Amino acid sequence: MRMHFPTSLLAEWGIVIIFSFVPLMTVLRRVKGAKPEIPELFELSLEELCNIQVHIPAALTKLSPEEIPASITVIRRTLFLA
Amino acid sequence: MKTYREYIIQFILFSYLFLWPSQANPAGEISEDEVKAAYIYRIIKFVEWPESILPKGRDALTVCLFGEDPIEKVLEPIKKLKAQGHAIRLERLGSMQSDRVCHVLFIGDKEEHHLKEILHLIKHLSMLTVSDIESFVSKGGMIGFVLKSGRVQLEINVEASRKAKIKLSSDLLEVATLLKVTRP
């Protein structure tokens, strides 16, 4: 099945450029952030290492069934004004 | 026959497939294992082994990793570095024997159930034991990594290192929490 392209050449290239943006930015980011052979961390002192805030990936917390309520009932007080 | 437009679309689709930004470790963020690996290298510089175990200027300093641990990958660059005039050798151990030549032994946290046996096996050797196993130093290990407020901190069991005839520099002891041994 053939794809239908916008008739205007300009619009067509516009779409191509927009969709190329993400892969292009990814390549640039990887080139820029490529790790050197010896990471800089190995040059830090003990004091500096002690103060580094590390990235901790999110983890699932295991909950036991007792901790999860089976249902929640909300009681509302309605105020009747005379 | 394919038109140039179809080639371009195919190229972009493949680019998306292979180059989608990875969220595993976004730029600028340092993992716990990277810091621990850097610590191991730095610690080596502040440790003195008996001359018979590590003759000055001779032999490579061997860092052994026991058990499967993600630190292995980030510790790789250590092989290109030197410490105290020694080249550094990195060895991964599948099993533990008392005749192993290891100056530093990192025990992965998955080996917690083997810890007692390992420490017993090497108790007469001058092997610096390092691990991120919970309460490692109070279990008889020498240097333990602990996570406090998102930072990797050191805990040291001076008594254990003294027994192994390993001297730890005061600079190292200064930045660590020292395990207090109370004798009856």
Image (tube, rainbow, N blue to C red):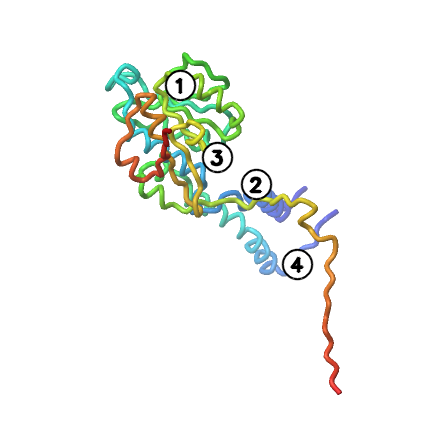
* B177 up-or-down from B91: above or below: below
- Give the residue at x 36% y 31%: B181
- Give the residue at x 48% y 46%: B26
Q: Which of B118 and B73 is in front in this view?
A: B118
Q: Name the residue under label 4.
A: A6
Earlier-in-chain disc, 2 versus 1: 2
Q: Do labels 3 and 4 share a chain?
A: no
What chain does badge 2 belong to?
Answer: B
Point out residue B91 in the picture as x, y percentages from the top left corner.
42, 21
Mark 2 is surrounded, within 10 Å at the Cα level, by few (under 14), some (14 to 19) or many (20 or more) other residues, namely few
Q: Mark 3 points at which residue?
A: B134
Give the number of the disc on residue B78: none
Q: What's the residue type where badge 4 is placed?
A: Pro
Q: Nearer the viewer, mark 2 or mark 1?
A: 1
- Give the residue at x 67% y 44%: A64
Q: Mark 2 points at which residue?
A: B18
Q: Mark 1 points at which residue?
A: B123
Q: Which of B176 and B94 is in front in this view?
A: B176
Q: What's the residue type where badge 2 is placed?
A: Phe
What chain does badge 1 belong to?
Answer: B
